[in-house]
């Protein structure tokens, strides 16, 4: 309201945006886009909530956000985080040197799941007593917050990807990629370090995953294939698509 004289006797507090249900837990803000709905986080977070609390998410600092508009279905940027089967062939020079391809830990919780892939530095633990082993710094642990968020604990930082479909466009989506770091970045050295991490994440996902998925999307729309096969080494991928089917009412 640049010129309040045109709106005499108006109480601004009565003309705000539509209030939406909101809850903070655990260190994350959850908002429901339906003003008349109610958040049912208890049942939603069952199973994964105790672990998420251990990461003390409220203390992390948002370092950078990238917003990508891409010509692929919204499920594809999610799919690419649900199996390391493709690391060796697609990510030869980016993340394949860092992670063991085609092996993962997986646990489903209702429509959600977590999945962990092992960094190759985990081999250094072989000669150490088990009491000195650490889980987080030798893995990338991804939580799928069903349906459209992938939340990844990357040893020393946190990455989230939230993907939204574009209305009436089956082959378009918007991806919000956020990188959270342990403390505010004040030195050039820290900035260079985190910028290199983001650069690797973007090169891997945008230049490799999304590039090939854009071709896949065109091929799917051609109608030449009616289905995809999921290998038994890709449990998270199968879990996600079964959960989607169930959410849409399939038996
Ligand atoms: Fe990938």
Image: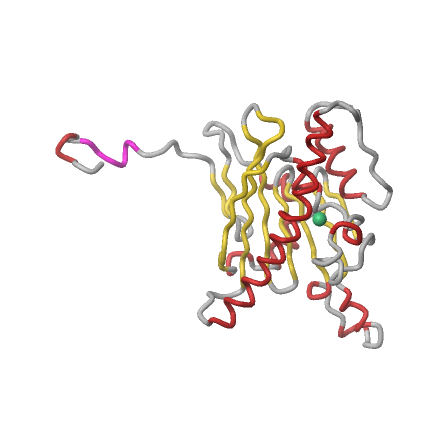
Q: Position of residue 182 (x, y in %)?
A: 54, 64
Magenta region: 10-15
- Pick the residue in front: 170 or 4: 170
Residue 59 inside the magenta-drawn segment: no
Above or below, 102 relative to 155:
above
Q: Quadrant of residue 123?
A: bottom right
Q: Quadrant of residue 175?
A: top right
Q: Residue at 76% of width from left, 56% of height from top? A: 92
Q: Is the C terminus in the top left, top right, bottom left or bottom right quadrant?
A: top right
Q: Position of residue 204 (x, y in %)?
A: 66, 52
Residue 11 inside the magenta-drawn segment: yes
Q: Position of residue 71 (x, y in %)?
A: 60, 34
- Pick the residue in front: 233 or 19: 233
Q: Residue at 51% of width from left, 29% of height from top? A: 37
Above or below, 237 relative to 135:
above
Q: Residue at 55% of width from left, 56% of height from top? A: 57
Q: Position of residue 44 (x, y in %)?
A: 63, 39
- Pick the residue in front: 143 or 82: 82
Above or below, 72 relative to 114:
above
């Amino acid at each position: 309201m640049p010129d309040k004289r045109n709106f005499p006797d108006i109480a601004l507090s009565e003309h705000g945006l539509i209030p939406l249900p909101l809850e903070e837990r655990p260190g994350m803000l959850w908002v429901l886009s339906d003003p008349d709905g109610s958040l049912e986080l208890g049942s939603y977070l069952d199973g994964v909530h105790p672990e998420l609390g251990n990461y003390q998410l409220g203390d992390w600092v948002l370092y950078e956000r990238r917003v990508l508009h891409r010509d692929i279905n919204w499920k594809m940027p999610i799919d690419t985080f649900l199996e390391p089967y493709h690391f060796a062939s697609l990510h030869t020079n980016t993340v394949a040197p860092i992670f063991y391809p085609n092996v993962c830990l997986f646990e489903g919780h209702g429509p959600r799941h977590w999945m962990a892939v092992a960094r190759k530095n985990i081999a250094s633990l072989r000669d150490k007593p088990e009491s000195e082993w650490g889980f987080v710094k030798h893995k990338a642990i991804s939580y799928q917050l069903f349906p459209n968020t992938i939340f990844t604990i990357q040893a020393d930082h946190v990455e989230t990807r939230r993907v939204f479909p574009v209305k009436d466009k089956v082959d378009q989506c918007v991806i919000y990629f956020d990188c959270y770091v342990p403390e505010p970045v004040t030195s050039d050295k820290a900035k260079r370090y985190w910028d290199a991490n983001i650069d690797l994440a973007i090169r891997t996902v945008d230049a490799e995953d999304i590039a090939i998925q854009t071709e896949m999307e065109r091929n799917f729309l051609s109608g030449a294939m009616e289905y995809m096969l999921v290998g038994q080494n890709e449990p998270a991928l199968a879990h996600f698509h079964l959960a989607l089917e169930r959410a849409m009412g399939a038996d």
